[in-house]
Image (spheres, rainbow, N blue to C red):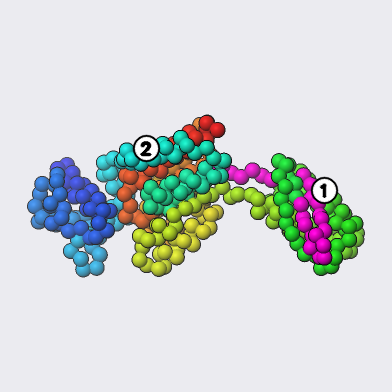
Amino acid sequence: MNAGVDDRRASILRAVIEAYINSAEPVGSAHVASLPGIGVSSATIRSEMNALEAEGYLQQPHTSAGRVPTERGYRRYVDELMTSIDVGPERIDRVDHFFNHAHLEIEELLSSTSRLLTSITDCAAVVTGPSPQRTHVLSVQLVSLGGRAVLIVVVDANGSVEKRTMEWPSEPEERHLIEIGTILTNHFRNREVREVDDIPHSPDAMVDTLIPACILAAKEAVRGAERDGVFIDGASRVVRAFDALETVRGIISILERHYMVVSLMRSILSKGQGVAIGSEHGLSSLRECAVIVAPYRVDGVQVGTVGLIGPTRMNYGSVIGVAQLVSEGLGKRLSEG
């Protein structure tokens, strides 16, 4: 194929993809011929669209005369044909205003950033924060609340106090409360709470039967206070782009499992990508989605990511630009303290 034909075919592919992104309707040769800069007849365009279909860049849905992009077509568009990453001045001003006035604690800032991303792009937004601090327990105390109710009070090494109420099989004796508190304090000392799986024992049979439940309550108190560092917003917006109930359920299922979302973001970045389209990200539930990921840095160190999940028929130039703009703003804001 000579350079002229190749350039013409690339222009037609770009035109079809951008028209489909804007309309969500299959694109015919007559529409492409009417666009500025194409400059060839409908017959020539039909011939080139047939060739693009044979090469795997376009497909013809059902019996429609028009074409829609394939996953391969979108990939070529993002890698080669997208003319610009265009955020637009209004969005730039909105992002700048947000970070200039976002004097928030880190968790609230990350949560607000995910809402900002969703409101700008209509995609599901994911913001991952720095890894949560590992929690070490300083002391555990048990307090009777009357009847069979017992309050577990856990003080961690940072001075935070977490509580959990549990019910004993009988009304507690003070000596048992004191003994279990001492046993649990010694058992957790200098150990990360998440790694404590063994159960200590006591020569007192009553105490020995109560220890497992008390350890579980103490761990639940700490876990309830820990954050997984993942903030997701906009699931309801992204599913509006799909009609198939199975697709909607699959997307919601993934977004509800934070660990899978984090793994997805890490996997995309580990491959040196910022954009994963359709099957490229490996999750069948998101096979009709594209995922955009942009890491952010604090004082030069990557500490988290900004991600957007939307239909493969998304405005890639705009969404990629927003992800990059927000990741830069978030990193700068966190570096300033």
* In front of the other: 146 or 331: 146
Placement of 35 over or under 242, stated as above or below: above
* Residue 133 is a magenta residue: yes
Q: Residue 191, can we see it?
A: no
x%, y% of residue 156? 73, 45
x%, y% of residue 120? 38, 47
Task: Kindly identify which numbered label has been placed on residue 311.
Answer: none
* In front of the other: 244 or 203: 244
Provide the residue span drawn in magenta: 129-153
Task: Kindly identify which numbered label has been placed on residue 93.
Answer: 2
x%, y% of residue 184? 81, 52
| Mark 1 / mark 2, whichever is N-terminal | 2
Residues packed near mark 1 inside 10 Å, few (<14), some (14 to 19) or many (20 plus): some
Q: Residue at x 28, y 40 (%)?
A: 84
Q: Which residue is mark 1?
A: 186
Residue 55 lies left or right of residue 39; in this view the side is: right
Q: Residue at x 25, y 50 (%)?
A: 18
> Image quadrant of residue 218?
bottom right
x%, y% of residue 196? 73, 52
Foreground disc of the pair 1, 2:
2
Specify the quadrant that holds the C terminus. Answer: top right
* Residue 200 is a magenta residue: no
